[in-house]
Image (cartoon, helix red, strand yellow):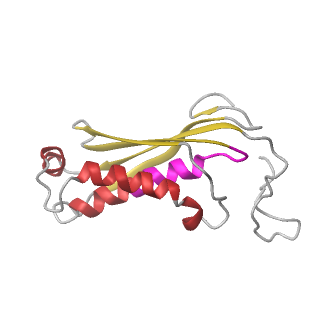
């Protein structure tokens, strides 16, 4: 396991100094899912949820969350993100909604936290908007699927290290 970069020699948490790192295009993709009753999925897909357009609202919430990650996660750098895409796919086999976020930046540090934050907040928004219909929903499987750019090179979940 590599050294934990957010800990100083005294063990205190600090923000990593990235000023000497070269800028490069960095991309991260994260995923998650909200598992729900088939009836709840029908409500979401049909657009009949009492709170309105669940998928559209969750997409916007995910995009907004990615842009504010540095305000939510104490040691994240504020980044000028160049692209954020959040996709929400109804999956009757789950049953539920699969959420995926792709975040890009040209900068000195990666965007994994921004992609994870986008997915997490999109999932939370789905939960919030239909919780009255299904309190047993579960948010599951939030993880980084892949990343590229930077010194550590590409990462693909499940690929041999």
> The C terminus is located in which quarter?
top right
- Give the side of residue 145 with respect to residue 149, left or right: left
Q: Nearer the viewer, residue 17 or 159?
A: 17
Residue at left offset 43%, top offset 51%: 63
Residue at left offset 13%, top offset 46%: 42
Q: In terms of secondary structure, what is the magenta stretch mainly? A: helix
Q: Nearer the viewer, residue 105 or 27?
A: 105
Q: Does 153 sit above or below residue 69? A: above
Residue at left offset 41%, top offset 53%: 62
When asked about the image quadrant of residue 21, the answer is top right
Residue extending farthest right: 9
x and y percentages locating residue 130 in the rendered image: 21, 60
x and y percentages locating residue 66 in the rendered image: 50, 54
Q: Does 45 sit above or below residue 128? A: above
Labels in figure, total: 0
x and y percentages locating residue 57 in the rendered image: 29, 54
Q: Does 45 sit above or below residue 117? A: above
Is residue 45 covered in magenta? no
When asked about the image quadrant of residue 127, the answer is bottom left
Q: Nearer the viewer, residue 21 or 2?
A: 21
Residue at left offset 79%, top offset 63%: 7
- Give the side of residue 50 with respect to residue 105, left or right: left
Q: What range is drawn magenta here?
A: 107-121
Is residue 110 covered in magenta? yes
When asked about the image quadrant of residue 137, the answer is bottom left
């Amino acid at each position: 396991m590599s050294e934990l970069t957010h800990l100083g020699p005294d063990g205190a948490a600090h923000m990593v100094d990235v000023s000497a790192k070269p800028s490069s295009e960095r991309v991260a993709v994260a995923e998650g899912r909200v598992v729900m009753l088939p009836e709840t999925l029908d409500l979401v897909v049909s657009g009949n949820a009492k709170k309105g357009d669940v998928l559209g609202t969750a997409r916007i919430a995910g995009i907004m969350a990615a842009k504010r990650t540095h305000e939510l996660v104490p040691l994240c750098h504020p980044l000028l993100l160049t692209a954020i895409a959040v996709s929400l796919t109804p999956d009757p086999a789950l049953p539920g909604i699969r959420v995926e976020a792709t975040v890009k930046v040209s900068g000195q540090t990666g965007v994994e936290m921004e992609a994870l934050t986008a997915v997490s907040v999109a999932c939370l928004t789905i939960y919030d908007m239909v919780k009255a219909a299904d309190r047993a929903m579960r948010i599951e499987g939030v993880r980084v699927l892949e990343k590229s750019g930077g010194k550590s090179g590409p990462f693909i979940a499940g690929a041999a290290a």
